[in-house]
Amino acid sequence: MKINKENAKKCIEKVSKVSRHYFRSIATQLLSQIRSTFEDVGKLLQANGGRYLVGDTFTAADLTFASMAALVVLPEEGYGASLENLRALFDTGTLKVPFIFHYLATPVHPSFPDLLTEFRNLPAGQHALRMYKLHRSGGAEGSKL
């Protein structure tokens, strides 16, 4: 096959189509794993009284979970990797590839706002957001994320 602009475009389109299918499959698995993790964390919170994951103080467990969950709950207090910019790009429609959900489709999958709301409303998502509110911005308890 002769390499020219038209053939290159066809090749790229074919690879892109295969990639989207493959990555959509991965995204479905990742979403399932995220939901399962959030469910497990919710159960742990319930068993421990709902305030912290381990004991009655902010620990590395809370820090780690909040840091990882930030990618799917987008805390208002920021993440250190400028989720505010991500949120602004998403809100204006400029962002076409949002974090973990970028494998769902391009442009932005229409369910991304629903997924964000879903994860924010789960007990584990509420916990992550609360950890950011209390500990990221020098909240009442003083520990920092």
Image (cartoon, rainbow, N blue to C red):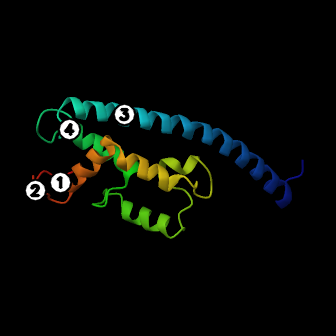
Q: N-terminal of the two: label 3 or label 1?
A: 3
The mark closer to the camera, 3 or 1, is 3
Q: Secondary structure at mark 4?
A: loop
- Local packing at callout 1 (Cα closer than 10 Å; few below 14, some 14-19, many 20+) is some
User: CA–CA distance between discs 2 and 4?
Assistant: 18 Å
**In this rendering, would 143 be left or right of 11?**
left
- Local packing at callout 2 (Cα closer than 10 Å; few below 14, some 14-19, many 20+) is few
The spot of residue 133 in percent (x, y) is 22, 56
Up-down relation of residue 55 to residue 71 (above or below): above
Q: Any mark on residue 50, and which?
A: 4
Report the front residue among 86 and 128.
128
- Residue positioned 54% across, 68% down in the render: 94
**In this rendering, would 35 be left or right of 53?**
right
Q: N-terminal of the two: label 2 or label 4?
A: 4
Q: Dots 1 and 2: beta carbons under 8 Å?
A: yes
User: CA–CA distance between discs 4 and 1?
Assistant: 15 Å
Q: N-terminal of the two: label 2 or label 3?
A: 3
Q: Is residue 86 visible?
A: yes
Q: Secondary structure at mark 3?
A: helix
The mark closer to the camera, 2 or 3, is 3
Q: Secondary structure at mark 1?
A: helix
- Residue positioned 55% across, 51% down in the render: 102
The mark closer to the camera, 2 or 4, is 4
Q: How many marks?
A: 4
Q: Dots 2 and 4: beta carbons under 8 Å?
A: no
Residue that badge 1 annotates: 134
Q: Any mark on residue 140, and which?
A: 2
Q: Is residue 4 visible?
A: no
Q: Mark 1 is on which residue type? A: Leu
User: CA–CA distance between discs 4 and 3?
Assistant: 13 Å
Q: Secondary structure at mark 2?
A: loop
